[in-house]
């Protein structure tokens, strides 16, 4: 190859370099803008809760003989819920005005990422807070409206110096369908996000606890129909939304 031809090739390469660098520069800018748009879209999705038509906080304070007062959720539990995309929840203690027995009622609704519910169960949360697991068994109860609900009942205790025990009734609702444990959540959703923002695509947990099994079963019978009315059924309908609209948006 002659020096003149070699020199011409080098000049051609040098002449092409600015175009290559300009093209690379604009591609870099484009990719950066695409990234920024994607981040904004992602933040909008995961940073915005998917709301129920009527918030769980509107669950009645007075139900039959029961009278409720809001409970403060421990910081660690609240932070866990926020990390796992809990969109709505209620935590309340109800006291039977006749018998003076009490129960703690906890309901959490997760639609932004229904799979975030996986792992949020008594057998994980209670031992994580110092409780010792004694027993778990399957059972069922019948609501005031005649619905039979299968659930798990867990027993825990704390050793000296506290010497406390607690009993926890727990079940789930997934897309309007009852579930005894979280397996249906794990099998249905894994960790996928609800990009469509559909409030009827969700997992919810209902948990009732106390020191007496008779108290939690009585509360489950009295409360469950109302709680389920706040959650979308398999067709996406929310019973309490129709009720509140018919009654001037007032819940007793």
Image: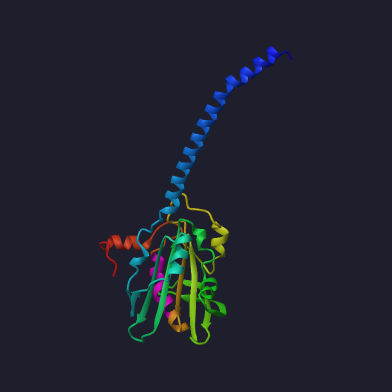
Instruction: Mark yes or no: residue 215 visible.
Output: yes
181 or 122: nearer the eye? 122
Magenta residues: mostly which secondary structure? Answer: helix
Count of marks, rendered view = 0
Instruction: Mark yes or no: residue 145 visible.
Output: no
211 or 15: nearer the eye? 15
**Colour option used:** rainbow
132 or 171: nearer the eye? 132
| Residue 215, percent from left and from top | 43, 82
Residue at position x 53%, y 80% in the image: 155
Which quadrant of the figure has residue 58? bottom left
| Residue 13, percent from left and from top | 62, 21
Outermost residue, right side: 1
Outermost residue, front side: 3
Residue at position x 39%, y 65% in the image: 229
Image position of 73 (left or right of 244): right
What segment carries the magenta color? 218-229
| Residue 41, percent from left and from top | 44, 45
Image quarter in which the C terminus is found: bottom left
- Compared with 35, 96 (above or below) is below
156 or 249: nearer the eye? 156
Residue at position x 47%, y 82% in the image: 213
Residue 226 lies in the magenta stretch: yes
| Residue 203, percent from left and from top | 48, 61
- Compared with 155, 111 (above or below) is above
Residue 193 lies in the magenta stretch: no
Image quarter in which the N terminus is found: top right
Outermost residue, left side: 248
């Amino acid at each position: 190859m002659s020096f003149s031809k070699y020199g011409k090739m080098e000049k051609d390469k040098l002449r092409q370099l600015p175009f290559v660098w300009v093209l690379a520069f604009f591609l870099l800018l484009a990719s950066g803008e695409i990234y920024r748009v994607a981040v904004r879209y992602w933040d909008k999705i995961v940073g915005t809760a998917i709301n129920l038509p009527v918030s769980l906080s509107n669950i009645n304070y007075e139900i039959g003989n029961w009278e409720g007062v809001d409970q403060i959720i421990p910081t660690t539990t609240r932070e866990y819920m926020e990390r796992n995309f809990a969109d709505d929840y209620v935590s309340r203690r109800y006291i039977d005005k006749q018998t003076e027995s009490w129960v703690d009622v906890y309901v959490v609704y997760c639609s932004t990422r229904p799979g975030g519910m996986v792992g949020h169960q008594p057998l994980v949360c209670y031992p994580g807070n110092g409780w010792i697991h004694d027993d778990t068994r399957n059972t069922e109860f019948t609501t005031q409206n005649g619905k039979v609900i299968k659930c798990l009942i867990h027993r825990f205790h704390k050793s000296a110096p506290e010497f406390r025990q607690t009993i926890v009734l727990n079940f789930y609702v997934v897309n309007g369908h009852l579930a005894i444990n979280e397996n249906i959540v794990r099998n249905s959703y894994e960790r996928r996000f609800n990009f469509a923002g559909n409030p009827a695509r969700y997992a919810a947990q209902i948990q009732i606890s106390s020191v007496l099994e008779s108290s939690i079963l009585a509360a489950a019978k009295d409360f469950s129909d109302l709680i389920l009315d706040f959650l979308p059924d398999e067709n996406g309908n929310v019973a309490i939304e129709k009720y509140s609209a018919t009654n001037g948006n007032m819940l007793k």
